Structures are given as structure tokens and as C-alpha cells.
Amino acid sequence: MARYFTDSEVDSSIILNLKVALIGYGNQGHAHALNLRDSGVKVTVGSYEGSKSGAAAREAGFEVLPTIQACKAADVIVMSVPDVPMGDIFRKDVLPALRPGHIVDFVHGFNIHFGLIEPPKDIDVIMVAPKGAGYGVRSEYVRGHGVPGLIAVHQDYSGKAWQTALSYAWGLGCSRAMLMETTFRQETVSDLFGEQAVLCGGIIECIKAGFETLVAGGYDLEAAYFECVHETKLIVDLLVAKGLHGLRKGISDTAEWGGYVAGPRVINEESREAMRQLLREIEDGTFTREWIEENRIGTPNMLQARQIEAESQLEKVGTDLRPRFMK
Ligand SMILES: NC(=O)c1ccc[n+]([C@@H]2O[C@H](COP(=O)([O-])OP(=O)(O)OC[C@H]3O[C@@H](n4cnc5c(N)ncnc54)[C@H](OP(=O)(O)O)[C@@H]3O)[C@@H](O)[C@H]2O)c1
């Protein structure tokens, strides 16, 4: 059974007495840097010559240093660079700066779980993974709340790694919501699986297929867009706020009945077997090997997929419709 923590169980003075270097100022990095600074933590940003986001960090008032210098000057080093180049960045710019007792924090367990980074034994290795995109991590903090966070310790050299991880999560605002104990393996596999099978893969394909089916059946593009794209938010908001039962109570009984009889025809045994296969390929490292190879050759397949999606009918209809009603 996982342990849960909230604000009252966290010692905020730990992180307030440490210097943090955010390596990377992208989606996650900028949110961590801003939240920590607003919580009173001393933050610098590690970057490289010519980095656009390094310039944005400087603009936001942060001291920006070459990564190796930022690491040397810090007690806590946060790896908020993209997962695939992270190993090379670690070996080139972080490892040479490490001293015994340093704390290296990951936002996602990918590199540690798959053995792509092998940290020295005389440092703490922790993970504070906010359950939200960087935008949400920042906007929730600004409105006085926070997103839940997953906490894990891979290496506890100091004997204080847990307390430090909890304290860092306090600085991010996550303990205002909830902190939950996990492992690097649990977080990595479930995160990759959730992205692929549900959030960024399954749901999106379901939306696209629904839109294309209505349009091919001769129905208006706009009606298809509202039904299959726009209204997903209303349903997801209800589900997140009130659960399955609450969601069913918020829709008509016709919609509820239609869902019961039609849903399992769309997501059926074949789809569930596809999900089990995705999980096996994440667990055995197949997905990671293929993603690293795609990066090695310059991501041609990802760029092509991006282009096809950008030019799709669904995207064109949405781009035209959204400004008409979203203010
Ligand atoms: N996106 C999310 O909200 C999200 C959610 C959960 C977990 N995570 C995890 O958070 C970590 C960071 O992902 P992200 O999505 O925030 O990445 P991102 O938005 O792509 O940002 C990466 C940052 O790293 C910088 N960078 C790239 N190469 C660098 C180098 N050699 N030295 C120093 N900085 C360098 C980039 O600078 P330039 O842009 O100037 O090149 C940018 O500021 C990953 O482990 C990811 O799995 C992300």
C-alpha cells in the first residue's frame, strides 16, 4: 500500500536551505523554477549557449549558467531536459560536476529505470513527478493549489533522500494537493502506458475515428467536431471531478444507456489485447529502444506524423471553429 503525504507532514525548511539548479527551462523546468522561487527557494537554471529557453529564463529573472557550472553551484540538480538526450547531457555536463552528497532529481523515471543513466553511488537520486503538464503545475500553484505528485527514491546515500524529495515537492506546490510514494519502475511504466494506450494514443485515435466516421456518413463537419472533439472536455471534467457514477448522473439516461451498449463494441477484446501488447513492449524495453533509434536518425517518422495531423480535416475544422466561440 503506497504512503500518502500532505503539507503538514513535510519539512519545508530542507529545500529552503538548499540551492536548486534546474537543468532545462522547458515545459516542466519553467514551472518548477517559478514555483520554487515563489516558495522562497534559491534557484538557478542550467542551459547551453544559444538556448532559446535559457534566454526566456534570463528574461524571467533567473541566473542562467552553463549546465556544468549550475550543477557545481547547486545542492539539488533537477534533470528537466528531454528524456532521450538526457543521458548524454548527464554524462557530459552533470557527471563531471558531481560531488559526494549531491542530490539529483528526476521529473520522470525513464532514464534511471531503463538504465540509460547510471549515477555514482555517493549521491542521492530522487524523483518528484508532478501529475500534470508544466502548464498545469504552474497554473495550479498560482491559484493557490497544486497538482498531486509522485515521489520515489532510487538511491539514499545521505539517509535523508525521502525528506528532501518531500520538501522539494512542497516547493512545487504538490503537497498542497497530495504526495504519493512510488518507485521509478511504477512511475515510468505506468506513465508511458497511460500516454500511449489512453491519453495521447487511445483517446486521440478514438476522437479522430469518431469524427471521420460522422463526416464520411455525410454529417456536417462542425457537428462532428462538436460531438467528437469539443464535448470530450465536458465528459472528462465530469469524470475527473465526480468519477464514473457522478459522470453518469450528469448525462441523459439515453446517453448513459448508449454508452453501456456501444462502448464495449468500440473498445473490445482486440483493443484490450493491443493494450496488453503495448504494456509488454514498454516493460521489455522495445518501445524505448525504438524511440531512441527514431531520435538517432533525426525523428523522420515523428515529423511525418506531425505533418499529417497538422493538415488533417479535423485540425482545419477546429482551427476555424475555436476562435468563433472560445473567448
Ligand atoms: N511536458 C511535460 O509537461 C512533462 C510531464 C511529465 C514529465 N515530464 C518530464 O520532464 C522532463 C522534461 O521534459 P519537458 O517536456 O519539460 O522537456 P521540454 O519542454 O522539451 O524542455 C526541455 C528543456 O531542456 C533544454 N535543453 C535541451 N538540451 C539541453 C542541454 N544540452 N543542456 C541544457 N538544457 C537543454 C531545452 O532548451 P531549448 O528548448 O532552448 O533547446 C528546454 O528548456 C522529461 O523527463 C519528461 O519526461 C514532462
Image (cartoon, rainbow, N blue to C red):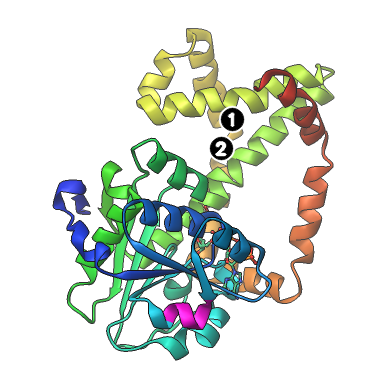
Using residue 90 as the reference point, say whether residue 220 is left or right of it.
right
Residue 7 makes an appearance in the image: yes
Give the residue pinned by disc 1: 265
Residue occupying the point 74% across, 17% down:
223
When the figure is inspected, residue 42 is found, relative to residue 196, above or below; the finding is below
Residue 192 makes an appearance in the image: no
Which structural element holds mark 1?
helix
When the figure is inspected, residue 25 is found, relative to residue 75, above or below; the finding is above
Which quadrant does ligand 1 occupy?
A: bottom right
Q: Disc 1 to disc 2, how far (Cα)? A: 6 Å
Which structural element holds mark 2?
loop
Give the amino acid type for the residue marked by disc 2 in the picture: Asn
Of 152 and 2, nearer the camera is 152
Of 10 and 199, nearer the camera is 10
Residue occupying the point 43% across, 87% down:
97
Looking at the rendering, the stretch of residues picked out in magenta corresponds to 66-71
Residue 73, how many percent across, how many down?
39, 80
Give the residue pinned by disc 2: 268
Residue 275 lies within the magenta run: no
Q: Would you call the spot at circle 1 few (<14 residues within 10 Å), some (14-19), or many (20 or more)?
A: few
Of 280 and 236, nearer the camera is 236
The quadrant the C terminus occupies is top right
- Mark 1 within 8 Å of ligand 1, using the beta carbon: no
SS majority, magenta: helix
When the figure is inspected, residue 30 is found, relative to residue 221, above or below; the finding is below
Q: Quadrant of residue 20?
A: bottom left
Residue occupying the point 66% across, 28% down:
229
Residue 29, disc: none
Asked if marks 1 and 2 touch (Cβ < 8 Å), the reply is yes
Residue occupying the point 63% across, 73% down:
292
